[in-house]
């Protein structure tokens, strides 16, 4: 699925409209896109694209077209971000992966990894 298709799909699912309708959508242009619907849309977009929008972008997000502009700029900023993982969290993730390799279920691997961390 392309990013554009993903973007359209978020509007379709959030506002229960057809894909053909989304390109003309504007904030408060339909009853579903009120202030509550707006925050639901932002949350859905953040989940779909694994991003965190800042307050200015959320306020400026006034239409389908404007949203495309805003999201387009995330590609420019993405290389500037660094993923920071606390040392203990990273160790925990590695322990979980090791437990899963030993044949534990995902949930059991988490429990075993937790107890392994306690012993260290």
Image: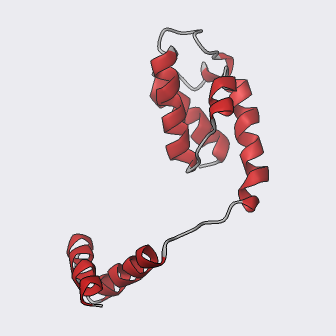
Instruction: Residue at 72%, 47% (x, y): give it.
Output: 74
Give the quarter of the figure containing the C terminus. Answer: bottom left
Q: Where is residue 42 in the image (x, y as percent from the top left)?
A: 54, 33
Q: Is residue 78 left or right of residue 88?
A: right
Colour scheme shown: secondary structure
Instruction: Residue at 67%, 20% (x, y): give it.
Output: 62
Q: Quadrant of residue 107?
A: bottom left
| Vertical side of 82 occupied by 69: above or below | above
Q: Position of residue 12 (x, y in %)?
A: 51, 28
Q: Where is residue 41 in the image (x, y as percent from the top left)?
A: 52, 29
Q: Quadrant of residue 7?
A: top right
- Counting the numbered discs, the total is 0
Residue nearest the viewer, comparing 114 with 96:
114
Residue 117: in sight, yes or no? Answer: yes
Residue 12: in sight, yes or no? Answer: no
| Vertical side of 65 occupied by 86: above or below | below
| Vertical side of 106 occupied by 113: above or below | below
Residue nearest the viewer, comparing 7 with 114:
114
Instruction: Residue at 68%, 30% (x, y): give it.
Output: 56
């Amino acid at each position: 699925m392309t990013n554009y298709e993903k973007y359209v799909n978020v509007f379709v699912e959030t506002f229960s409209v057809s894909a053909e309708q989304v390109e003309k959508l504007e904030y408060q242009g339909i009853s579903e896109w009120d202030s509550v619907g707006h925050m639901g849309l932002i949350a859905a977009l953040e989940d779909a694209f694994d991003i965190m929008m800042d307050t200015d972008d959320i306020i400026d997000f006034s239409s389908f077209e404007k949203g495309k502009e805003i999201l387009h700029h995330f590609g420019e900023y993405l290389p500037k971000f660094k993923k920071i993982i606390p040392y203990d969290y990273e160790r925990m993730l590695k322990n979980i992966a090791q437990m899963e390799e030993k044949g534990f279920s995902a949930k059991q691997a988490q429990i075993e990894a937790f107890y392994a961390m306690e012993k260290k």
